[in-house]
Image (cartoon, rainbow, N blue to C red):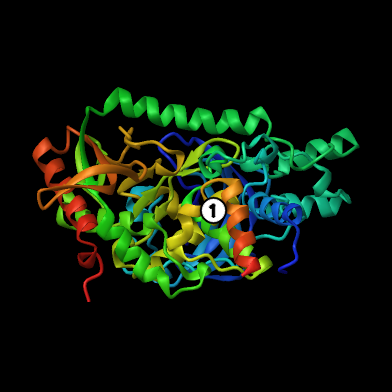
Amino acid sequence: MADLSRDALRDTVIDCILAVAPEADVDALSPGRPWREALEIDSFDFLNILVDLEKRLGVSVPESDYHELATLDGLIDYLERRLAS
Amino acid sequence: MSEFRMPSLGADMESGTLVEWLIRPGERVERGQVVAVVETQKGAIDVEIWEAGSVERLVAEEGQKVPVGEVLALIRGEDEATGRQVPADRHTLEASRAPDLSPPPARAIPETPAAGERLRISPAARKRAAELGLDPAGVSGSGVGGSVTLDDIARAAEAGEPAPSARTAPTTDAHAAMRQAIAAAMARSKREIPHYYLGHTLCVEPALAWLEAHNAERPVAERLIFPVLQLRAVALALEAVPELNGWYRDGAFQPAEGVHLGVAIALRGGGLVAPALHDTDRLSPDAMMTALRDLLTRARKDRLRSSELTAAGLTVTNLGDLGVESVQGVIYPPQVALVGFGCLVERPWVRDGQVVAARCLHASLAADHRVSDGAIGARFLRQLTDHLQEPERLWPT
């Protein structure tokens, strides 16, 4: 898993988001802006996305790290870091 | 012999289409069993029966549009000797429900559907498609959330060729129907209910610390979300101030039996439903999370139950996830109050004479002035905010 490229990681993240919000226009998303509000992802959807990410990547995100996941870039950076460590 | 009738699943419902029978003549039915699927303006609803017995005869046919109150089936009751009839009025039905009746077992639903399994279709539509040899995946859904309905299958069969994709946006028909239902309810609310509004901003750092501690040792799938604490606080406040838990009917307040909070849920693709979370006040944190997960999942899959559309004595709306700071809500008639929560915002807060940065939340109450006055509303809101500010009081051990 640790050698997953950034693009592949991004695809995985987007897959997980689309599984919860099939109609989400992910392409229109600005990578540096808060994605949850833009895609109307509530706390329940967010939890489901984290469950899915854990299943696919083996990364369990503690609640104290949630603030690092606010933007799509931040989320991918965070996962990259966790996978590398 | 008792008559099982088309229930009223909302103040403005006139009729519903029976899409599927889940029972057969001769079969035994239990109280609370889901026996039929009915399509309404609010989507497909699993309709429960509140009398145990055996099915004598199915009167209505699948696909038939049936007015509210018309007979759907005849049930031979267990206490047949008394010749007692089931009341057709849903208010009586709800009132006669034992408050400790445990909700029917939840349908097994995969928590995160695998890609490619996302086709939304009612069981009746799926069955009909199979009969016609149609692939439902190729049929464009006009139901809530883009679900494929019986009508869509009929249209596709008539057209002779399937529409290009099941995931195209729902047609304006389903949207228009739900919009109309919301419009009717909200217009009635604003026309008839003299709303008054109260609001309070509170610091939620203690509640968030409680939540983080609770979740710290748990895998993601078993964690709680903040709305569980909000719902709990509302449920406890309602126990303390029952004047806001119930309905205004025929010129008088009718208290609800038990605390069943309506949870406003925005549907993807537009629209809104506010089904009841049964016995909100009796649920442990984990049980509430499970019940909430089940309710949200079914609401979005178009599989709510009839009792969930009628049982709520007060509704809670949470617009915080959309970045809204405060809500002045519109009461769902015939309910008499609505609680609104905004988002968590970091604000300067004074604690022990010091200004600190703290996450804050705005809680609001919209209430019916025919039933309660500001003093009662204030007492309720105080209870609510006290519980949220002292989270150890939420589930005292």
Question: Where B250 falls versus A13 (above or below)?
Answer: above
* Image-quadrant location for residue B247: top left
Give whichever of B283, B97 is nearer the camera.
B283
Residue at label 1?
A: A45
* Image-quadrant location for residue A1: bottom right
Chain of the residue that carries numbered disc 1 in the rendered image: A
Residue B174 drawn at (x, y percent): 62, 34
Question: Where B182 falls versus A65 (above or below)?
Answer: above
* Image-quadrant location for residue B111: bottom right
Using residue B375 as the reference point, say whether residue B166 is left or right of it.
right
Give whichever of B302, B17 is nearer the camera.
B302
Give whichever of B195, B397 is nearer the camera.
B397
Using residue B170 as the reference point, say whether residue B397 is left or right of it.
left
Q: In percent of the image, x 44 and y 72: which residue is there?
A: B78
Q: In percent of the image, x 80 and y 35: which residue is there?
A: B155
Residue B288 drawn at (x, y percent): 39, 65
Residue B122 drawn at (x, y percent): 68, 51
Using residue B44 as the reference point, say whether residue B195 is left or right of it.
left
Task: Give the amino acid at mark 1.
Answer: Asp
Q: Secondary structure at mark 1?
A: helix
Q: Residue furthest top?
A: B191
Residue A18 drawn at (x, y percent): 67, 49
Give whichever of B184, B331 is nearer the camera.
B331
Give the crowd class for mark 1: few <14, some 14-19, many >=20 residues within 10 Å: many
Quarter in which the C terminus of chain B is drawn: bottom left
Q: Is residue A48 visible?
A: yes
